[in-house]
């Protein structure tokens, strides 16, 4: 019997879209052979003619009209690589309504409307796959969902933003300022022209929500994620961190506590002997702590056209397998349960604090009293450098309730001898 031909339509011929077409051309023969499939890229749609020309496909295989992908009854699988919320959300909805399997790399959309789209896919007995939405080429989504299903994940800690990891690596290893490191990352293509979502932590928050939904099976909400970007971290902080055996990373942390889910994105001091400390440059990693497996880490290229294209095409193959044999129905089999969230103020954390103070009697006493009043125990105090006329003091606390630390900080900032805007960075425990 002749094998059924499965036709693919692609929306979006930007950097990732072109990567998918290039990888398709390079590997489709072996992909089909290995999986006993006949997958064919039928049509690519993009509003920009020049992007379509760059794909070097036959004229009949490209279009500026998305409906020629969405409404073509011969197309079985639609790949959405437009990004952003609209028109991506409407297009995915339309593709599912039209009976097509959908693949997306869209983290913004999956973090904000993923549940609604997965519900629709389930209702239609179809699938929506999104392996490329987190961690680019790292096999992560399917692993978190399938391979850890028999365990109970307690916490996941991710370096899921390449731009900020590159910046911190170059500040640490190259002595660059934050701005110099960002410019270098942009020059090398590791950072976008507008890196706002990356440096402010939103990109990592999107990815955290997607992963938390999968590992905790509860409805993680973007507006319940505490998000702090890398703006407050200077070269001096990185140098002090190294001196005491740490490096600084932007972390996305999700944990299930008895009171609910705690979700946060912020820079953190990571011990140099922690596996995440050796994740350098633009690379990503997710470190999972679970009851039975204990600790596992997934590591690799979190972005880039070709690594991301491998995740997209793997999803295409998965969709084709489902069409053939209904192997899997939905990446989330049932609607996620509602959950409580633990506010950042209730978490127990260790803090690094770097302050500048006038060098006069009573400053340490004031610091000690403010921390003592709030039951904040200090682990380490360093004072060895002057900045002009000012003394620079670095303090590491023991684990404290964040609220208590913030109250102590407020008291400290009322002293005229203490200069405003200290550096405050949490530690990874
Ligand atoms: N802008 C992201 C990063 C890549 O810097 O990691 C896409 O998710």
Image (tube, grey):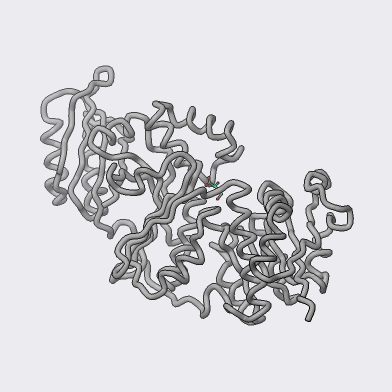
Determine whether 82 is above or below 379 in the image: below
Q: Is residue 55 above or below residue 34?
A: above
Quarter holding the N terminus is: bottom right
59 or 243: nearer the eye?
Answer: 59
The residue positioned 64% from the left and 66% from the top of the image is: 34
Quadrant of the image occupied by residue 36 = bottom right
The x, y position of residue 227, in whole percent, is: 43, 51
Residue 425 image offset from top left, x and y in percent:
31, 43
Residue 254: x %, y % from top left? 38, 60
Q: Is residue 34 left or right of residue 196?
A: right
119 relative to 155 in the view: left or right:
right
Judge whether 122 appears above or below 235 on screen: below
Quadrant of the image occupied by residue 331: bottom right
Q: Nearer the viewer, residue 10 or 267?
A: 10
- Front-lying residue, 292 or 349: 292
Residue lying at the far right of the rendered structure: 59
Q: Is residue 63 left or right of residue 214?
A: right
Q: Is residue 359 left or right of residue 291?
A: left
**Residue 422, percent across and down?**
30, 35
Q: Residue at x 37, y 71 (%)?
A: 340
Q: For the point 67% across and 68% down, which residue is it?
A: 102
Q: Is residue 311 or residue 204 the one in the foreground?
A: 311
């Amino acid at each position: 019997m002749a094998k059924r031909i499965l036709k693919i339509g692609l929306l979006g011929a930007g950097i990732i879209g072109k990567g998918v077409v290039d990888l398709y051309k390079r590997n489709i023969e072996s992909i089909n052979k290995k999986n006993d499939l006949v997958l064919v890229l039928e049509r690519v749609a993009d509003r920009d003619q020049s992007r379509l020309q760059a794909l070097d496909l036959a004229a009949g295989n490209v279009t500026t009209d998305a409906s020629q992908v969405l409404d073509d009854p011969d197309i079985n699988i639609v790949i959405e690589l437009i990004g952003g919320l609209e028109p991506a959300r409407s297009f995915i909805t339309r593709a599912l309504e039209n009976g097509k399997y959908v693949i997306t790399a869209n983290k913004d959309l999956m973090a904000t409307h993923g549940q609604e789209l997965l519900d629709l896919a389930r209702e239609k007995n179809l699938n929506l796959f999104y392996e490329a939405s987190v961690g680019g080429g790292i096999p992560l989504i399917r692993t978190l969902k399938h391979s850890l299903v028999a365990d109970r994940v307690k916490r996941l800690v991710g370096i899921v933003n390449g731009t900020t990891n590159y910046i911190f690596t170059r500040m640490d290893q190259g002595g660059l300022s934050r701005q110099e490191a960002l410019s270098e990352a942009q020059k090398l293509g590791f950072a976008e022209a507008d890196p706002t979502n990356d440096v402010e932590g939103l990109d990592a928050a999107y990815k955290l929500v997607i992963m938390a939904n999968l590992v905790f099976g509860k409805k993680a909400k973007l507006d319940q994620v505490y998000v702090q970007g890398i703006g407050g971290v200077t070269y001096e902080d990185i140098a002090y961190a190294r001196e005491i055996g740490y490096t600084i990373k932007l972390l996305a942390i999700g944990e299930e506590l008895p009171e609910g889910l705690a979700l946060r994105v912020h820079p953190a001091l990571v011990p140099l002997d922690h596996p995440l400390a050796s994740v350098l440059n633009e690379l990503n990693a997710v470190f999972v702590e679970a009851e039975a497996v204990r600790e596992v880490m997934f590591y690799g290229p979190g972005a880039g056209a070709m690594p991301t294209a491998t995740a997209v095409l793997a999803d295409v193959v998965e969709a084709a397998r489902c069409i053939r044999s209904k192997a899997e129905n939905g990446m989330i089999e049932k609607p996620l349960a509602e959950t409580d969230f633990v506010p950042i103020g209730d978490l127990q954390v260790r803090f690094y604090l770097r302050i500048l103070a006038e060098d006069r009697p009573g400053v340490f006493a004031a610091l000690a009293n403010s921390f003592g009043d709030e039951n904040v125990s200090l682990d380490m105090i360093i004072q060895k450098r002057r900045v002009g006329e000012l003394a620079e003091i670095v303090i590491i606390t023991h684990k404290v309730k964040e609220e208590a630390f913030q109250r102590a900080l407020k008291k400290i900032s009322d002293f005229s001898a203490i200069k405003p805007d200290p550096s405050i960075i949490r530690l990874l425990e």
